[in-house]
Image (cartoon, rainbow, N blue to C red):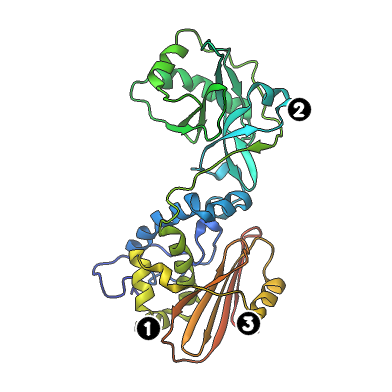
């Protein structure tokens, strides 16, 4: 059984201690290919592309707005490395906390803005620093305790000459001069409208006087936020590879090991493994009527589905995450010579349930 469906016989001494998810685990996938289908080496090579696709590609927009998070969880406590951004409260006149702190660090999860524990420092027109304000997060079980831990850590961070942090430039043009320092999962994040921003000079300025006590601090009230996000390298192969690999994994899962090892699949196998020429398998085609009807009956709202259709010499796959409407298909091979079939997989990540369909009419 130990024969990698991706490396096939092109690489010796492969190991098989892990099992590849059919639908990526980061999207809520549950079912895995049997042990021996995908080598650890292939699995690890794919991980970097999956991370980019889910965090920085067009797919990340759907994932941020709908969910789920790590391993399909909708529990915000399990979010480890979200994309942190600067959010602007667009109705600050309604709540005191958003009036005093209109800009704040946070991340989008399942369609909701999650605010980090942070300190907000604003400067007036003459560069006089106003009283810093603490803002509690809106997602931890004990926001005051989390904010207190941040308050304790902050002087150490500012005094450390070898400090590490992630800087986030304000994507929104504003005349307000501000600096926000936030904390999440043992990482510091700094957002600012000041350019160029020099942390050493700012840290020295902030340390000239004692940091304010934790109380009073601001709760994060419910608000509407505006933000802008720039996707990193929109042409990165990670986005198409995630779709093509999911189609290939699904075919392997539904038709078996010996079937997927046929030489007719070598071209797509090689393209996935090397993340090259993936666009040649991506063909423009509207969803056929039979597929639309099947989706309406069998696929819950926001669920993922993969349908494999073999007809004549072609095997193609329809891959949709979050039940997005499709205008393309993935042609896995055009050299098939077997019987026709229609197979499918539905991943209802909201209910943590997956289902196989061995006959689609």
Q: Which quadrant of the figure has residue 309?
A: bottom right
Residue at the far right in the pictured view: 94
**Nearest to viewer (mark 2 / mark 1):** 2
Callout 1 secondary element? helix
Q: Position of residue 185 (x, y in %)?
A: 49, 36
Distance between the Cα atoms at labels 2 and 3? 52 Å
Residue position marked by numbered label 3 in the rendering: 360
Give the crowd class for mark 3: few <14, some 14-19, many >=20 residues within 10 Å. some
* Cβ–Cβ under 8 Å for marks 2 and 1: no
Q: What residue is drawn where x is 59% and y is 43%?
A: 108
Q: Which mark is residue 264?
A: 1
Residue drawn 61% across and 75% down?
A: 287
> Where residue 166 appears, x then y in whole percent?
43, 33
292 in relation to 189, above or below: below
Please tell me in which quadrant of the rendered image residue 115 appears. Answer: top right
Answer left or right for 44 relative to 143. left
Q: Are marks 3 and 1 in contact (CB under 8 Å)?
A: no
Element at badge 3? loop
Identify which residue, 172 or 333, lies in the foreground.
172
Compared with 186, 36 (above or below) is below
């Amino acid at each position: 059984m130990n024969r990698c469906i991706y490396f096939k016989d092109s690489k010796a001494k492969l190991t098989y201690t892990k099992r590849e998810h059919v639908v990526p685990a980061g999207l809520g996938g549950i079912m895995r290919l049997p042990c021996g289908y995908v080598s650890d080496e292939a699995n690890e090579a794919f991980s970097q592309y999956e991370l980019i696709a889910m965090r920085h590609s067009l797919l990340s927009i759907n994932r941020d707005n709908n969910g789920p998070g790590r391993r399909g969880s909708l529990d915000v406590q399990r979010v480890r490395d979200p994309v942190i951004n600067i959010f602007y409260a667009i109705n600050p006149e309604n709540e005191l906390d958003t009036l005093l702190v209109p800009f704040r660090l946070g991340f989008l999860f399942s369609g909701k803005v999650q605010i980090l524990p942070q300190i907000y420092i604003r400067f007036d027109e003459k560069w006089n620093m106003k009283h810093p304000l603490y803002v509690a997060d809106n997602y931890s079980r004990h926001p005051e305790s989390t904010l207190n831990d941040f308050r304790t850590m902050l002087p150490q961070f500012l005094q450390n000459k070898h400090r590490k942090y992630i800087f986030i430039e304000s994507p929104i043009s504003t005349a307000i001069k501000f600096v926000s320092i936030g904390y999440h999962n043992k990482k510091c994040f700094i957002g600012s409208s000041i350019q160029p921003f020099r942390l050493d000079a700012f840290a020295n300025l902030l340390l000239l006087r004692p940091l304010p006590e934790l109380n009073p601090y601001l709760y994060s009230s419910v608000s509407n936020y505006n933000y802008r996000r720039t996707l990193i390298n929109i042409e990165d192969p990670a986005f198409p590879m995630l779709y093509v690999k999911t189609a290939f994994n699904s075919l392997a899962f539904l038709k078996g090991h010996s079937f997927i090892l046929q030489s007719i699949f070598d071209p797509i196998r090689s393209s996935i493994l090397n993340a090259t020429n993936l666009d040649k398998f991506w063909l423009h085609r509207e969803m056929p009527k039979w597929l639309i009807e099947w989706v309406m009956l069998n696929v819950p709202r926001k669920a993922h589905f993969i349908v494999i259709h073999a007809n004549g010499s072609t095997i193609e796959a329809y891959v949709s995450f979050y039940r997005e409407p499709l205008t393309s298909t993935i042609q896995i091979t055009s050299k098939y010579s077997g019987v026709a079939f229609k197979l499918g997989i539905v991943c209802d990540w909201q209910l943590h349930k997956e289902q196989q369909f061995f006959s689609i009419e």
